[in-house]
Image (cartoon, helix red, strand yellow):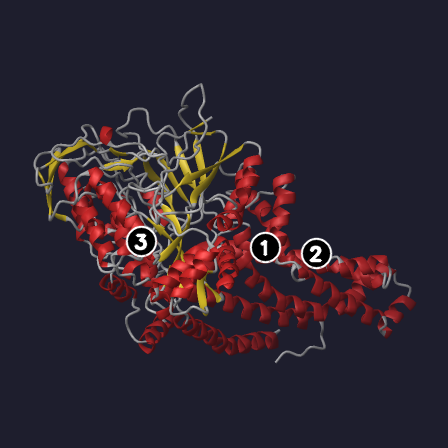
Amino acid sequence: MRKTWRYAVTRLAHSVPVVFGVTIVTFLLLHLIPGDPARKLVGPHAGPAAVAAVRRQLGLDGSLVNQFGVFLSRLAHGDTGRSFFYGVSTRSLVISRLSVTAALVGLAALFCVILTLPLATLAAVHKDRLADHAIRVIPLVGLGMPAFWIGILFIIVFSVNLGWFPVGGWGVTLGDHLRALVLPALTAALGIIPLLIRSLRAGVLDVLKADFVATARAKGLREMRVLFRHVTRNALIPTVALLGLNIAYLIGSTVIVERVFDLNGLGSLMLDAVGNRDFPVVEGVTLVFAVAVVALNLFTDLVSAQLDPRIRLG
Amino acid sequence: MKDPPGSLSRRDLMRRTAIGAGVLAFGPAAQACSSAGSSGGTSASGPKRGGTLTFGRGTGVVNFDPANTIADSDVYTLDKIFEPLYITDPQGKLIPWLVLGHTVSSDAKTWTFTLRPGVKFSDGKPLTADDVVFSVMRCAKDTAGPLSYLDAAIKSMHATGARTFVAELTQPWAPFISDLSVYSNAIVPKDLNGQSAQSFFKKPIGTGPFVIKSWTPGANLTLARNKGYWQPGKPYLDEIQFPVIADENQRVLQLKSGTIDIAGSAPPASVSGLKSASGVSVGLFPGWLCDLLLFNEKIPKFADRHVRRAIAHAIDRKAISTAASFGTAPPAGSFIPPSVQFYDPKTPVLGYDLAAAKAELSQSHFPHGFSTKLLVPSSNAQYAATAQIIQSELQKLNISVAIQSLDDASYHQEFQSFHYEMFLNWSVNDITDPDDMCTFQVDPKAGGSDSYWTSYNNPAAIALVHQGETTQDTAQRAKIYSTLQAVVSADAPFIPLDYPPYIFAWRNNVHNFKVIASGTYRLESVWLD
């Protein structure tokens, strides 16, 4: 256990330069792409003096090196600045939107697990039969179609026509939130479920051939117990790693999914901020996303180690 | 809501400014324009009081300061809280609102106004002339204010009584009342009730029909009835919720499912579906808008008048209207839209005529054609389709067009830095009078945009713009603007393509919903059943 903690702390220390690097690259990219936040704020009628005044007010009048220095100094104090557009601290904006995105990613990950485990196992057990082909082919639709398209189809079918879920929005009560999240989470999950099913199916097929499975069967264990106690657990290890990696993809996909389903989370905030050239907000959201991805990767490694005692941390 | 070119938007419209010689009482002298489109249904049972209207829009309110914002969602909301001295009604008439009327001196430089009695701010304090002087001069003096240039003719303003005040102008200025009607000149309490602007506009106090109940900047907003509103019995609604629904298709779906009552800015492609949807109405409201193809005259090929005229003749505006706007935007003639005062339907237009186009090109310095680039904003599906049609049509003149699609911020920076050859955008008038758009698009210096970043510079056209500003007689002004429209049409510094409407859709339980040509909507008369 102590070793696990030591490993986690070391990995966290190693992730600091990663997060720092992402933040710096974001800062530089933002300042290199065309588009002037000051001009956006004051409109086209404003003269050069008015634009210059706003640039000064936003701290955009200094050299890039100077602005970078100010940015780093603020960051060192845990301050990601004030939004150019909303006029409030980036931190408060991020905090107000974080729960929506976290819930969306969490539920999407849950859907991945709930759908992948039985489907992949079923496909492996019925290898090369109809169920196997169906399970391997049908989810590919999710991989092949863009999330915004699947999202709109879901809305038309399940919200507008059947009325099972809200068309969009977040609602007021916890029940509203859960109902509001089902379709977006499913949309996001469908983008990675086919990969997970294929990975787990292949894993199950490999493990089914292993000697210890033959031993378990020879001991007279029931097939279900063999499958879930011995086979799936061992086959899960690469799939867990794959899921961990793809949750990072899920976080990225929230940018589109939140927009389609009218969820005011971090993805939506990011999209607006990029359009408005709201530099502090883009930097703040990127920082949160970077930390989340690093933390998830670490968590995945720790879970993999728990599943497979052969994995040595450190 | 559509966010215009460089970003501006909303404007007010009036058909006729009755600025004749001598004394004028406004309101009745103004004539209705034919711009108002369809509107929310009416009921034989008459208006009902109460209820909450849910109005889905694309962006949230960030700033309530009238003098310091130009964002659509800010502007179309702050006018529910603050009111100007005059407003444009849904029929396009400029009518007195917080004033009873005004008189003008014989030299047309001194304007005297009388405030409407009984108007109070939402905190109960009466509206006074001091509040008006503070508000208008606050906007006029703020050089960073996006629309402060509209107050440039004001030399001074002072109160002469509790309800009377006088404005002194630097020169006779025909669009003055129109300028006063713009949202940026809306009335706030004197000295912002002793608060800083930052503090005051977090919980603003105005004379408008609604007050803020709750607000998260950039996100959801709820307005509640101003119980002391000066129009007896109004507003009818208890509350208005403005949820932010960024995706336009999502807004339409939420409307169809009954989650919201009104969907702001429905996409043109959704109009036919909305018309056949049950329980829903859709309205196409003419705006002070015109889609344009603009040329960079700083580069030789587009400095050549014959090239621009050839392109004007080569473009089939009807095809663009049908294919790109799904028939919602009528093909354009003059650069002044029909809903703006002094639009001349008889303006000679360089219409679709391939033979004429080839003849024009043969007279240019580029008779054998050339390659060029067309800049479009990537977020605008209609412009993507328009660009493809233009690309195809100009091929017939051996003009090869490469379409350059950039995200909005980059797109604006590119054309405002003249890093473009042709670009698609739309023009917007901010007031009822055409002076705003004429100055912006034709006068390279006074407009502040080098003639909408085309560098068009025709001294005859500029002189006409100035004559239109200082001539008081309405009939004379009509002639001046007719000539100006003909001159600009012949020069073709930009090609008017179509007149896009404001498209709104609402549930049939919403009554009396009307959109003004500026793109805003007054909600004090809206009711639900």
- Whether residue B445 can be seen here: yes
Q: Position of residue A52 (x, y in %)?
A: 25, 65
- Give how far apart the Cα atoms at labels 3 and 2 are: 66 Å
Instruction: Tell if the residue under mark 3 belongs to the same chain as the one under mark 2.
Output: no
Judging depth in this view, the residue of A304 and B333 nearest the camera is: B333
Name the residue beneath numbered marker 3.
B488
- Mark 1–mark 3 distance (CA, rounded to whole Å): 44 Å
Q: Is residue B230 above or below residue A82?
A: above
Q: Secondary structure at mark 3?
A: helix
Residue A279 position in % (x across, y down): 39, 65
Q: Are marks 1 and 2 on the same chain?
A: yes
Name the amino acid type tagged 1: Phe
Identity, as a three-letter code, of the amino acid under mark 3: Val
Q: Say which of B286 and A251 sits in front.
A: B286
User: How far apart in space, not on screen, are marks 1 and 2 (Cα)?
Assistant: 23 Å
**Residue B416 as seen in the image, left or right of residue A2:** left
**Which of B423/B408 is in front?**
B423
Residue matched to label 1 = A148
- Disc 1, SS: helix
Circle 2 SS class:
helix
Which residue is rendered at x = 50% and y = 30% of the image?
B508
Residue B120 is situated, as x and y percent measured from the top left of the image, at 22, 32
Q: Chain of mark 1?
A: A
